[in-house]
Structure formats: structure tokens, C-alpha cells
Image (cartoon, rainbow, N blue to C red):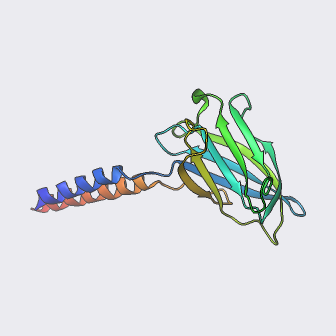
Amino acid sequence: MTFRLIVLALTLNILGSFQTAQALLINASLSNISGNTWQYNYTVTNDSATDIEWFAIYFDDLNYDNLALVSGPSSIEWDIIVEQPGAFFSGEDGYIDLLAWDPSFALGFGETISNLIVSFDFAGTGEPPGAQTAEVYDPTQIDPVVIDSTSTPATVNQAPVSGISWLFMLGMLGTLRAAKCARKF
């Protein structure tokens, strides 16, 4: 019985390690500059084993106008494009797009871009909505091919633990429980 519990715990732990993790963790603090002018101060962290060379954060066409990059990573390392909502087609979301000029400038595992600040005019009432969509793209493709998608909270929060970590911890607890049960017999 004990051997079966240990094998089960180890199997769950190994299977859990094959789950995909969220590649991009984005936290943002929201500040009102004046009137309907606001800004997000983003902290972007790579939470995957794969380097991130290209990602974008989207701004809803109905709520955002006059996007402007206030601060960001070095333009020597990153190509940053700010596209206004509805610039080409009505209803088209705006975005800030970041592409590493060279793979050596990519965001490696655990690396962070801080003080990526975007100002905007909020077209709605009250405060801007909390969540925004963000996507990570395959840099080897000319046209954007999404390899990960996430959403951003609008407050600075501690980075959430990825799915792999939770499953690993669950597997470890199962292993410890199995070991404890084995000692009783």
C-alpha cells in the first residue's frame, strides 16, 4: 500500500510538471494624472523557460484614446510601437508592442521589465477597467503568431504562483503524506 501511494504521488508530480505555465506575468499600477488622463506603470516578468522576444499589451477601442509611451526599456534593445485604438479600423484595439532587436536582448526566465509606463485618455466613466489582454508572439514569424495570452491586473500584486508550482507542491505534499503513512506501518 505504501509503495502505491509513493508511486501515485511521484506520478502526479511528474504529470504536473508537463502542464504549461503562464509565460508572461504583468502587473500594473493605475494612476490618475488629471481629469480623464491616466497611466499604467507595468512590471513585466517572464515566468517561462522560453525567452520572450515579442509581446503586446492591448487597449480596448471603446475605453482608451491617445496612448503614449512615457517610459520603457532601452530603445537600443527593444523596438516599441504604440498603435492608437481605431487607427486603421473602427473598433480596432490599440496596443503597445515590444520586440527585442536581437535575441540576446530577450526577456529570459525570471527577468523583468520595470517602469513600462503608458499614458492614455480614458473615454469611459469612473476608473479604467482593471484587466487588459496581453499576448506573446513567436518572433520567427513575420505575421504575429500567438504563443501565449494573458490578462493584466490593474493593481500591483505579488506575482501569482504558476500552475507548475502548484502541482509540484501538491505532489510534494502527497509524497510527504505517503512517507508519513509508511512510517506508521
User: Which quadrant is home to the N terminus?
Assistant: bottom left
Q: Residue at x 63, y 57 (%)?
A: 133
Q: Is residue 159 left or right of residue 82?
A: left
Q: Is residue 62 visible?
A: yes
Spot occupied by residue 169 in the image (x, y as percentages of width and height): 36, 55
Residue 118, compared with residue 1, is above or below; it is above
Q: In which quarter of the view is residue 54 placed?
A: top right
Q: Is residue 158 visible?
A: no
Q: Is residue 95 left or right of residue 159?
A: right
Nearer the observer, 143 or 55? 143
Nearer the observer, 113 or 121? 121
- Toward the right, the furthest residue is 35
Nearer the observer, 18 or 35? 18
Residue 176, compared with residue 106, is above or below; it is below
Q: Is residue 48 left or right of residue 135?
A: left
Q: Residue at x 75, y 63 (%)?
A: 91
Q: In which quarter of the view is residue 131 placed?
A: bottom right
Q: Residue at x 82, y 55 (%)?
A: 120
Spot occupied by residue 110 in the image (x, y as percentages of width and height): 53, 40
| Total labels drawn | 0
Spot occupied by residue 75 in the image (x, y as percentages of width and height): 74, 32
User: Which quadrant is home to the C terminus?
Assistant: bottom left
Spot occupied by residue 93 in the image (x, y as percentages of width and height): 73, 58
